[in-house]
Image (spheres, rainbow, N blue to C red):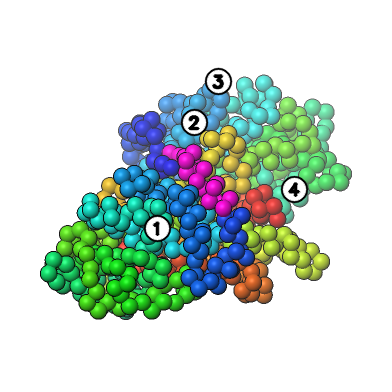
């Protein structure tokens, strides 16, 4: 039993935190949000220099061969800083290639990802299908030696910046994964509530390269989405930490009736409940990341990840709502970062499945 | 990061588990499983079994019978007892008076009391709360006046758990009513319950059970040798005890056992031709509670791990474990109530003939009884005050 990060993980966490404090504070972030691309190529370059884009990929492709636990401290720091770069999206796409792709495909794609030259996205959500992972709205059919894809995907996070997409599709033999050039699809990009960039995409006979065996895609999709869910749990913990810390600071400095409002017991107890919930959520993020790496089978992994996501979803709502309430009117203002952690936490609560979705999955796993 | 126990800790857990399986008497195990009231003899029998094994006071120094276990081993032992469903070890002697004597007692006091506490020869209870002093303990009024080599004690204690079983009571009493600070002038006295002038009156709780009492002191003569620490510095002793709360405050082992029992029971209940476990409304509540329990267990392990690494006492962390642990315990009794449904209603037999299932009839009284958990040992609101002050600096 050991809940500490190892030395490498700690060093990485420290350097990411230092970078965010120095170069990604709230004003700097605001500029990036307002830019045409909605992310910073310079920041992305720094991520690559720091090795962040290589953490979960094999040393054969220039990566570090790490897992969710190694990414946990990075995601927590990103959550605290409300980083909007398409980091998770790129990892997701890359992980699909790493887990399903052939050696040649991995060699072609992963070094580019690790070196920060290629951003990716994973297109798996379909309109009206909510959190269902088995594809049906995109169909794949054989065309000569390759495949063509037809249909649409929605809310593909990171798609506007991506060079390559991984698209889930229904092939004759069942759910399958395809590598698709971003130029081959029609993109309808937008900003998300939490200031990330995403797109709905339309595929009309888009050329796709099969990743892994035809019809065997679902297990890979589930594993990659569980991995990503564990990572957003860690990211949520970071955003919760920011929301709790900034609210506590506000209680100590904001004065009404001649005293700091933190002297009022009604507010103290609400603040305490936020911190208790934060600690409980952090414990579940540890569990999710640990099991995403080392679960004996898919069922054990699903059980732990869904348990964590239930807790994270409930706590994200509690902490985000309370952080605004305790800030009073100021919490409503876009000028305060706490209104942005509210937005991110609200989205995370539903990303990769809301509490109800995971309650269903938890009970059946 | 590694969430699992080490090989050595797992081996220790298996050893404890195996020993409990072999040594927990079946009749005691069944009484616990069926929520039956435990007699004084039941409690002492289990105490005696552990004392014989040398496991009754793991946290004490080795010279007084402690086991020398690490904090993690102690936690494992306590949670395994909870999971196996052993009778509780009554904390007043082993975890309260004992540690106080070890820290503040004279050699004479230690020699006189500690071996008897260890062997279960003296049954102890706690004299803290008074009718006017609950959460505001420092307002206590029971007074002790020095007269030669005795104190004369007058006043009343209340909510005295198992006072009707007790041989001894440790009390906070006011020895100096003139101090400017209320926390000063309080002393810590050990009082023999057989002393003339002590009256114990039962307080029957809403579940019909007798576990707490009122204790009246009417010119009770207490030898001055029974004063612990200095006269007027009893508050220091009381505060030390608060900081001495144990890491199993969350009672995770016991809650895991209750959860398993709840699932088993609910699986056998039918609703619309299906098991209650297949009813999404019920199941979601159960799942959320299970997740809370998972989170509490990992949080508890995180705190233990930190304690082991820093050597620092847990401080306000224990308050968090108490709040979450008791909320979960209450949540379990609430869902069990829901699971038994209409069978929650039968309460007590008339004419000596219990024409109802005694297990299901025990659920509602237990639900009533467990409302105490968020009130006792520092109400959950007091625990929030502690966290606000100590952890958050508010």
Secondary structure of residue under mark 1: loop
Q: Earlier in the sequence, mark 4 or mark 2?
A: 2
Return the mark for residue B63: 3
Same chain assignment for discs 1 and 4: no
Return the mark for residue B70: 2
Q: Earlier in the sequence, mark 3 or mark 4?
A: 3
Q: Chain of mark 3?
A: B
Q: Which residues are magenta?
A: A1-19
Q: Is residue A5 magenta?
A: yes
- Nearer to us of marks 3 and 4 is 3
Q: CA distance from mark 4 to mark 2?
A: 34 Å
Q: Quadrant of the C terminus of chain A?
A: bottom left
Q: Nearer the viewer, residue A61 or A287?
A: A61
Which SS type dominates the magenta stretch?
helix
Q: Nearer the viewer, residue A6 or A287?
A: A6
Q: Is residue A21 visible?
A: yes
Return the mark for residue B138: 4
């Amino acid at each position: 039993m050991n809940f500490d990060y190892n030395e490498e993980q700690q060093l990485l966490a420290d350097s990411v935190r230092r970078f965010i404090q120095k170069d990604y504070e709230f004003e700097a972030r605001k500029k990036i949000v307002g830019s045409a691309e909605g992310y910073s190529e310079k920041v992305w370059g720094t991520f690559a220099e720091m090795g962040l884009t290589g953490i979960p990929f094999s040393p054969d492709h220039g990566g570090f061969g790490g897992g969710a636990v190694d990414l946990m401290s990075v995601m927590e720091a990103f959550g605290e800083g409300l980083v909007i770069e398409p980091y998770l999206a790129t990892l997701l796409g890359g992980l699909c290639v790493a887990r399903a792709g052939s050696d040649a495909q991995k060699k072609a794609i992963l070094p580019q990802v690790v070196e920060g030259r290629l951003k990716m996205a994973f297109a798996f959500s379909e309109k009206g299908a909510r959190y269902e992972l088995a594809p049906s709205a995109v169909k794949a059919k054989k065309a000569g030696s390759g495949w063509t894809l037809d249909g649409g995907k929605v809310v593909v996070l990171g798609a506007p910046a991506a060079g390559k997409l991984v698209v889930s599709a229904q092939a004759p033999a069942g759910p399958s994964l395809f590598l698709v050039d971003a130029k081959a699809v029609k993109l309808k990009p937008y900003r998300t509530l939490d200031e990330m960039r995403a797109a709905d995409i339309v595929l009309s006979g888009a050329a796709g390269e099969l990743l892994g065996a035809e019809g065997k895609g679902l297990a890979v999709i589930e594993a990659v989405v569980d991995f990503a869910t564990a990572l957003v749990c860690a990211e949520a913990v970071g955003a919760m930490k920011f929301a709790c810390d900034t609210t506590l600071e506000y209680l100590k400095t904001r004065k009404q009736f001649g005293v700091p409002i933190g002297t009022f017991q009604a507010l103290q107890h609400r603040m305490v409940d936020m911190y208790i919930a934060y600690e409980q959520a952090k414990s579940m993020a540890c569990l999710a990341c640990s099991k995403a790496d080392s679960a004996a089978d898919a069922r054990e992994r699903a059980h732990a990840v869904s348990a964590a996501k239930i807790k994270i979803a409930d706590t994200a709502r509690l902490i985000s709502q309370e952080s605004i309430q305790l800030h009073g009117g100021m919490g409503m203002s876009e000028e305060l970062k706490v209104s942005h952690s509210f937005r991110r936490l609200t989205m995370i609560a539903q990303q990769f499945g809301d509490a109800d979705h995971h309650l269903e999955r938890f009970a059946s796993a | 990061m590694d969430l699992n126990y080490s090989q050595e800790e797992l081996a220790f857990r298996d050893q404890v588990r195996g020993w409990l399986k072999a040594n927990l008497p079946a009749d005691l195990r069944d009484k616990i499983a069926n929520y039956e009231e435990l007699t004084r003899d039941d409690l002492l029998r289990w105490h005696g079994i552990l004392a014989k094994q040398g496991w009754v006071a793991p946290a004490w120094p080795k010279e007084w019978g402690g086991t020398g276990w690490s904090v993690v081993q102690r936690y494992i032992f306590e949670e395994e007892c909870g999971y196996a469903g052993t009778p509780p070890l009554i904390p007043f002697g082993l975890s309260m008076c004992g540690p106080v004597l070890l820290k503040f007692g004279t050699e004479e006091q230690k020699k006189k009391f500690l071996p008897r506490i260890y062997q279960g020869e003296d049954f102890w209870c706690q004299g803290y709360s008074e009718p006017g002093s609950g959460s505001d303990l420092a307002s206590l009024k029971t007074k002790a006046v020095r007269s030669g080599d005795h104190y004369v004690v007058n006043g009343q204690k209340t909510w005295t758990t198992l006072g009707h079983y007790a041989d001894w009571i440790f009390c906070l009493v006011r020895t100096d009513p003139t101090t400017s600070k209320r926390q000063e002038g309080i002393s810590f006295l050990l009082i023999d319950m057989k002393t003339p002038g002590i009256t114990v009156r039962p307080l029957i709780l809403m579940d019909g059970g007798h576990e707490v009492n009122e204790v009246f002191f009417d010119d009770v003569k207490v030898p001055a040798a029974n004063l612990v620490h200095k006269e007027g510095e009893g508050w220091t002793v009381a505060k030390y005890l608060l900081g001495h709360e144990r890491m199993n405050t969350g009672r995770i082992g016991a809650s895991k056992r209750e959860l398993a029992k709840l699932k088993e029971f609910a699986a056998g209940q039918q609703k619309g031709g299906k098991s209650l476990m297949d009813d999404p409304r019920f199941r979601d509540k159960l799942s959320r509670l299970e997740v809370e329990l998972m989170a509490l267990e990992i949080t508890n392990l995180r705190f233990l791990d930190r304690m082991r690494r820093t050597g620092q006492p847990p401080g306000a962390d224990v308050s968090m474990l108490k709040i979450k642990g008791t909320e979960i315990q209450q949540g379990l009794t609430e869902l069990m109530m829901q699971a038994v449904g209409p069978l929650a209603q039968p309460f007590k037999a008339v004419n000596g003939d219990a024409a109802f299932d005694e297990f299901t009839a025990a659920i509602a009284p237990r639900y009533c009884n467990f409302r105490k958990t968020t009130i006792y040992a520092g109400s959950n609101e007091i625990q929030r005050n502690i966290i606000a002050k100590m952890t958050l600096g508010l």
